[in-house]
Amino acid sequence: MCRNIKTLFNFAPPATDEEVHAASVQFVRKLSGFTHPSKANEAAFLRSVDQIAKVARKLIDSLETDSAPKSREVEALKAKERSAKRFGTPERRPAARAPSRAKA
């Protein structure tokens, strides 16, 4: 799954239409391979984003759970902790070195 697509179900407050649309854009980008489609493909790209956003909203609104809604702030902190564990904190990362040039 595309790393930029975030879970949108079971949050307090619920996912906004903007968040659903952003996830739909990421999904269509992943499927099509286009970050920005050409003029020839733009209409199909945007139509697909709109259709997927409608279906995604319908899905999110129809899902049910007995678990308590998750907090966006708590989930964001967890994501930061996972990232720091995986990549290190900025002060702990090794300094980037300039590429060496081989002498001829």
Image (spheres, rainbow, N blue to C red):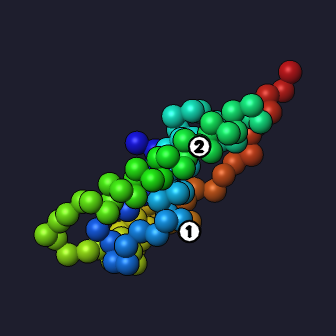
| Residue 42 relative to residue 6: left or right | right
Residue 80 falls in which quadrant of the image? Answer: bottom left
Image mark for residue 47: 2
Q: Residues within 10 Å of mark 2 (few under 14, many from 20)?
A: few
Q: Residue furthest top?
A: 104
Circle 1 or circle 2, nearest the eye: 2
Query: Which SS class for mark 1?
Result: loop
Q: Position of residue 87 (x, y in %)?
A: 47, 56
- Of residues 93 and 30, the one drawn nearer to the viewer in this rendering: 30
Residue depicted at x 37% and y 62%: 8
Amino acid, disc 2: Arg
Q: CA distance from mark 1 to mark 2?
A: 44 Å
Residue depicted at x 74% and y 31%: 40
Q: Position of residue 2 (x, y in %)?
A: 46, 44
- Of residues 81 and 88, the one drawn nearer to the viewer in this rendering: 81
Q: Relative to residue 72, is residue 79 depicted above or below?
A: above
Point out the image quarter for the N terminus. top left
Point out the image quarter for the C terminus. top right
Q: Earlier in the sequence, mark 1 or mark 2?
A: 2
- Of residues 51 and 7, the one drawn nearer to the viewer in this rendering: 51
| Residue 7 relative to residue 37: left or right | left
Q: Position of residue 52 (x, y in %)?
A: 47, 47
Residue located beneath label 1 in the image: 91
Residue 6 falls in which quadrant of the image? Answer: bottom left
| Residue 59 relative to residue 54: left or right | left
Q: Is residue 85 visible?
A: no
Q: Relative to residue 28, is residue 53 depicted above or below?
A: below
Query: Which SS class for mark 2?
Result: helix
Q: Relative to residue 30, is residue 86 depicted above or below?
A: below
Q: Position of residue 65 (x, y in %)?
A: 17, 65
Q: Residues within 10 Å of mark 1 (few under 14, many from 20)?
A: few
Amino acid, disc 1: Glu
